[in-house]
């Protein structure tokens, strides 16, 4: 197994030395990285099952976060995916083959975790099909809908918890600017984005704002005229 990891490290080094990054296909590269993320999840799950976190006197998420130099939130996500990926063959194969990204696979594994005994394996292929076709944002909405249909009480409980977790700070700065920071529940966040998007309409060739300064998605065509 160590030899296999050494070969992977050597291949990655060869890629960095030899690749012309001006011509690397970002979609293919992302698919390779996402597939390896799935492998990392499985490795972390094996470590959790062995009790490696106990030797370090840490919680599983803290152990994974420290081991892999990531946040506890990211570590908990990897542990959840690792716990379920082997039992979800359609999801695992689609991720390994580059047909879906890691974040879509993560959404499916979290849905599996949330539903527990209500999870229907026969529905996995259909959900993977949605993951192939939908944007990640729309697929997350699809997963929320599936959760609501299969477990309405649990969904409502989570919504109530999300509502309690929300916060928003708008603080004036010394130069008159304002700093905005916060966490919004899904419904409030969608309404907030809709309101912002309505103010971010492109105003013509003289409008030089980039997306972070208010330009909407998709970007306006270069051929647009007043």
Image (tube, rainbow, N blue to C red):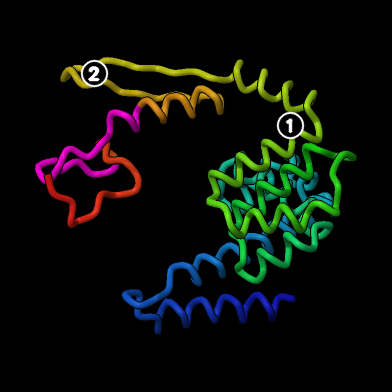
Q: Closer to the camera, 136 or 10?
A: 136
Q: Quadrant of the N terminus?
A: bottom right
**In front: 86, or 58?**
86
Q: Which residue is mark 2?
A: 173
Categorize mark 1 by other alpha carbons within 10 Å: few (<14), some (14-19), many (20+): some
Of pointers 1 and 2, the one earlier in the residue sequence: 1
What mark, if any, has residue 174 been given in the picture? none
Residue appearing at x 68%, y 42% in the figure: 143
The 10 Å Cα crowd at callout 2, few under 14, some 14 to 19, many 20 or more, is: few
Q: Is residue 126 left or right of residue 142?
A: right
- Name the residue beneath numbered marker 1: 148
Magenta residues: mostly which secondary structure? loop
Is residue 47 visible from the viewing direction of this image?
no
Residue 36 percent across, percent down from the top left: 62, 66
Residue bounds of the magenta highlight? 196-211
x, y percent for residue 139:
60, 47
In the rendered view, tell whether residue 180 sits above or below residue 81.
above
| Residue 216 appears anywhere in the view | yes
């Amino acid at each position: 197994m160590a030899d296999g990891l050494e070969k992977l490290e050597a291949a990655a080094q060869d890629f960095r030395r030899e690749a012309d990054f001006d011509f690397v296909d970002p979609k293919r590269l992302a698919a390779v990285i996402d597939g390896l993320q799935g492998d990392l999840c499985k490795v972390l799950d094996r470590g959790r099952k062995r009790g490696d976190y106990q030797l370090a006197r840490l919680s599983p998420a803290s152990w994974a976060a420290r081991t892999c130099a990531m946040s506890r939130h990211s570590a908990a996500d990897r542990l959840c995916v690792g716990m379920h990926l082997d039992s979800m063959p359609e999801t695992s194969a689609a991720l390994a083959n580059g047909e879906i990204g890691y974040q879509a696979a993560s959404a499916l594994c979290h849905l599996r975790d949330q539903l527990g005994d209500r999870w229907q394996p026969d529905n996995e292929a259909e959900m993977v099909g949605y993951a192939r076709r939908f944007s990640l944002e729309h697929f997350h909405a699809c997963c929320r809908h599936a959760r609501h249909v299969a477990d309405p009480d649990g969904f409502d409980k989570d919504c109530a918890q999300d509502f309690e977790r929300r916060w928003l700070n708008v603080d004036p700065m010394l130069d008159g600017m304002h700093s905005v920071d916060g966490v919004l529940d899904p419904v409030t966040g969608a309404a907030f984005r809709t309101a912002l998007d309505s103010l971010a309409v492109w105003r013509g060739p003289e409008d030089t704002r980039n997306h972070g300064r208010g330009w909407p998605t998709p970007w306006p065509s270069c051929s647009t005229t007043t």
